[in-house]
Structure formats: structure tokens, C-alpha cells
Image (tube, rainbow, N blue to C red):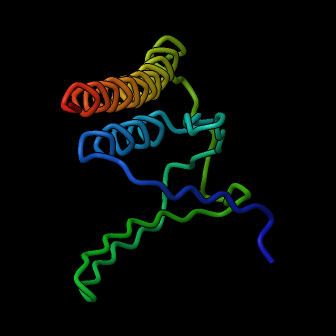
Amino acid sequence: MKDLKFEQKRSLSRLEAADQLTAIAAALREGGEAELKLSPGTLSLRVPEDLRSEIEVEIGDGEIELEIELKWPTTPTRTELPRTGADPEEATRRKEGARQAGAQQYRHQRKQEREAVRHEGVLSSARTSDRP
């Protein structure tokens, strides 16, 4: 049984996918307690120095599926030592970078939604004006 499972499935543009991966990369780069902005909230995770990864590509039924999976233990391992002498200002800069990447992703998503609504309004007006 899983302690917690969060799953998010949605359609997004190539640029939105890139923004999402950038935000994840920034959170991983930050390490420690990483925050990842996901609608409707923020997911906070402890990210250790060492991870296990799996990349899987499946092609079939007219689709390509790319899965990137990262795993790490929920409790620190004995070999995972606390960071000593870490620059607190650098940690703050990394955390701010991760927040900005998440905010940028959120702003881009909202812009796309506004453009879609605006586009639908233009199409609706055009349909109405075409009527005799």
C-alpha cells in the first residue's frame, strides 16, 4: 500500500511541458526540501543527493509514451550525510530559482487559457457576423 499518491493527467502544449520539466529540474537541483508548484497547490519533498532513475519509451497504438521515473527512500540512508558548510545564500538563491520556475509555468498556463478564451470569443463573433 502506498503512503501517498498524487497523480495529475492533463493535456498541455510542448512549451507547457518544457516549463513543467524545468520546474521539476529546478526543484531537484535545489535538493533538500524542494517545493514543486502543481495545481491546485504545492508539493514539498525531501530530495536526497542520490536518486535512482528509470527512463522508458513505448511506441504503439499510434502514440509515443515517454516516462521519466525518479525514486529515493522516504528516510535518509546512513550514507546520506547532512550538508555541512553549505552556503545559506546559495540555498536561498536555488530555492528562489525553483519558485520563479514554478511561477513562470503558472503564468504561462494562465496566458494560454486567456488566449484560448479570447480565440473562442473571436470565433463566436465571426460565426454570428456570418449569419444573414
What is the x, y in percent for residue 116?
Answer: 34, 32
Figure quadrant of the C terminus: top left
| Residue at 66% from the left image edge and 57% from the top image edge | 6
User: In the visual, does 111 lie left or right of 45?
Assistant: left
| Residue at 32% from the left image edge and 40% from the top image edge | 16
Work out whether residue 114 or residue 71 is closer to the camera in this orientation and state it.
Answer: 114
- Point out the residue furthest to the top here: 89
| Residue at 23% from the left image edge and 32% from the top image edge | 131
Tell me the quarter of the picture where residue 127 sits: top left
Where is 8 relative to 113, above or below? below
Tell me the quarter of the picture where residue 55 sits: bottom left
What is the x, y in percent for residue 15?
Answer: 25, 40
- Point out the residue furthest to the front here: 132
Work out whether residue 114 or residue 104 is closer to the camera in this orientation and state it.
Answer: 114
Figure quadrant of the N terminus: bottom right
What is the x, y in percent for residue 115?
Answer: 31, 25
Work out whether residue 85 or residue 88 is closer to the camera in this orientation and state it.
Answer: 88
- Point out the residue furthest to the bottom here: 60
User: In the visual, does 22 lie left or right of 63?
Assistant: right
What is the x, y in percent for residue 121?
Answer: 34, 26
Work out whether residue 127 or residue 32 is closer to the camera in this orientation and state it.
Answer: 127
Marker count (numbered): 0
| Residue at 39% from the left image edge and 73% from the top image edge | 54
Where is 29 relative to 14, above or below? above
User: In the visual, does 129 lie left or right of 34?
Assistant: left
